[in-house]
Amino acid sequence: MEKNAEHTSHVHRDDEADKLGMWLFIFTELLLFGMLFLMYAVYRYRNPVAFQLGGEEIDVVIGVINTVILLISSATVAMSITAIQRGKKTQALLFLGTTLIIAVVFLVNKYFEWGTKIEYGFYPGGEALLELGHGTVLFFGLYYIMSGIHALHIIIGIGLFIYVFQQIRAEKIHKTDYVWLENTGLYWHLVDLIWIFLFPLFYLIH
């Protein structure tokens, strides 16, 4: 009996360490994007007209669609965690699968958005972009860097969702051991939060 209690306590400490590690990771990611947001603010202050012109070239409709579906995905991943806590495996898989599909849809939208910009020559080193001047080059440079890093986080999230989905199916993640799902949910909320800041900066503020 004591041995089982010690084992349970050990597992509990490991879970707490995993959660702490995820929060530390989230903190470092917030620092990274915080510096990028600060850089954006400085360059925008110095090049207000160029940033306004650059913002007018961004597709607001795609931005709105991606914002809505990411907000939905935050809800579905949270519902997946709630379902697994209640021992409802099928519901957890359904909600997690929905979140995974939304993540893929986001990337598909981003692919077409970037593709359109590149087709028009609005990419680093593109002649059409260079003709608009240094300030607009800075705007699109930040646009590709910041949205690109965010897209990379989406790809990582997709990988995590696939792994967790398989673990739930194999019943290695269940109602008494779901720290991987919980940490993946925290990571995804971070991805959504970053987008909530990126969206107005590039799509709305003209």
Image (cartoon, helix red, strand yellow):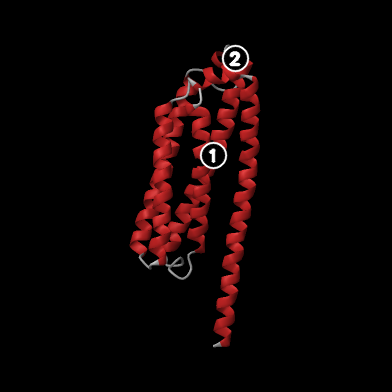
Residue 151 shows in the view? no
**Residue 2 appears left or right of 72:** right
Q: Are marks 2 and 1 in contact (CB under 8 Å)?
A: no
Q: Nearer the viewer, residue 177 or 127?
A: 177
Q: Which residue is mark 1?
A: 150
- Say what secondary structure mark 1 lies in: helix
Q: Is residue 134 above or below residue 6?
A: above
Mark 2 — residue? 130
The image shows residue 19 at horizontal and vertical percentages of 58, 61
Pointer 1: residues within 10 angstroms few (<14), some, or many (20+)? some
Q: Secondary structure at mark 2?
A: helix
Picture quarter containing residue 126? top right
Q: Amino acid at mark 1?
A: His
Q: Amino acid at mark 2?
A: Leu
Q: Residue at x 42, y 63 (%)?
A: 168
x, y percentage for residue 165?
A: 43, 57
- Is 91 situated above or below 87? above
Q: Earlier in the sequence, mark 2 or mark 1?
A: 2
Distance from Cα at disc 2 to Cα at disc 1: 25 Å
